[in-house]
Image (cartoon, rainbow, N blue to C red):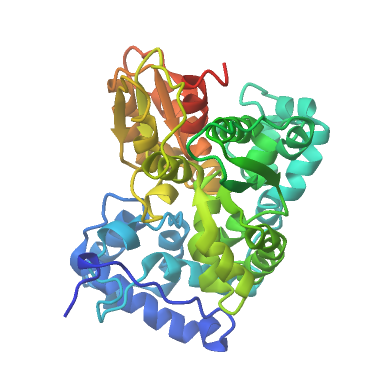
Amino acid sequence: MEQGSSGAPIRHPIAWQDPDFYNEEKLDAEMRRVFDLCHGCRRCFSLCDSFPRLFDLIDESESGEMDSVSSADFKPVVDACTLCDLCFMTKCPYVPPHEWDLDFPHLMLRYRAVEHAKGKTGFMEKQLTETDRNGKLASVTSGIANWASSTSNKLTRPVMEAVAGVHREAALPKFHGKTLTARAKAEKPQVNTDAPAHGRKAVLYATCYGNYNNPEIGEAARRVLAHNGVETEVVYPGCCGMPQLEQGDLPRVAKNAASVAAELRPWIDKGYDVIALVPSCALMLKFEWPLIATEDENVKALSQKTFDVSEYIVAIAKTEGLADGLKPLDGGVAVHLACHARVQNVGAKAVEMMRLVPEADVAVIERCSGHGGSWGIMKNNFEVALKVGKTTARNVSKSGKKYVSSECPLAGTHIMQGIDRLDGDKPEIELSSHPVMLFARAYGLMD
């Protein structure tokens, strides 16, 4: 018998078009089978709040075993799962090819898909996940949107908490009036033809966050790549569907996958690599889409040509070599390894990239921030998210570095909120939204 952790885990396609996928009796039987295995193992107790909730549920039952646990009590366990995939990719010894065939995150996804199919997803929950539409609207009125969403706004944030369920103290992404796609049209960095990697071509998939909330990540990536001889274009065909995946809306994810992959396929056919600016979106394109849109040839082609931006820069360094010009940063960097970057099976590329900077002083923070995408901003989850991320915040605080950066910008902001809540004196730490922005600064390409 081979344990999954002794080799590469195998993930099965998500059978969301099979009627049995939504059969509640079969779902309940699988939940009980998996929960009983988790109860007997407990290796994942420290990863997120799902497992402590599950183990408390079983331990406090009449028999202390699954046979006396009510299925009606499963939902809090499901709700605490952020679909980070760390249990599947890094901890569980019973993932395929093990015969027990355990995939906890995708089981939680199935439960949510059944709930979504039954119409149990709330109206406001759906509206919050319309990141593409919300970004378009907010970018037109960015000043008002940022004023209304500020945690210091005692007028609007309590209303937002009451109406939308967003915790009034949770920091929310800012919006920009000029999107990344608009900036890309206005400015195209000159490609360094003397760079060792000259001849490479890449199209940057802007992502919702990179396009509307933090265009500077894309600008930094373009400048670094151009300096290293890479011709780039920026496109944003639409959202990757990660917010809808979190709610179990698999038909919507499949629809997004088909439309985005169809628009990106011509770039691949022209010899361009595809670079995603945010690891959650890279994970969707590389791994989740092929498991959902299993017959879509465009999705298959895209999954083979998609790279995380840090992964791509490290690949240049290892193959052709980087262009000259990197200079030491004026302080050390605490690099947080985001969960959706860790589970891409490519290694700690953000850390590798930052260690390419001369005299690099890098602290590695390999623990969950607790944010979990849209999960961590909700009223019922925010305090739990801070609790889960407290050790990460403490480790960053103790690192003594000038900068902290995460490939997941939302995680970086959440870590800073966690640091603010720590006891004692707070160190002066500067948040950089993404390691590629610090890399661009080391090249002298950004302030």
Q: Is residue 403 left or right of residue 172?
A: left
Res. 109 visible in picture = yes
Q: Nearer the viewer, residue 62 or 263?
A: 263
Q: Nearer the viewer, residue 36 or 325?
A: 325
Q: Residue at x 48, y 77 (%)?
A: 13
Q: Quadrant of the N terminus?
A: bottom left
Q: Nearer the viewer, residue 407 or 19?
A: 407
Q: How many marks?
A: 0
Res. 116 visible in picture = no
Relative to 403, residue 229 above or below: below
Q: Residue at x 33, y 26 (%)?
A: 396
Relative to 110, residue 316 above or below: above
Q: Is residue 20 left or right of residue 142?
A: left
Quadrant of residue 5 within the rendered picture = bottom left
Instruction: Identify the residue at the far left of this view.
Output: 1
The percent position of residue 196, horizontal first and vertical second, equals 47, 37
Q: Quadrant of the C terminus?
A: top right
Relative to 119, residue 367 above or below: above
Relative to 250, residue 42 above or below: above
The percent position of residue 94, horizontal first and vertical second, equals 25, 71
The percent position of residue 142, horizontal first and vertical second, equals 77, 30
The percent position of residue 281, horizontal first and vertical second, equals 56, 52
Instruction: Identify the residue at the far right of this view.
Output: 140
Q: Nearer the viewer, residue 159 or 189?
A: 189
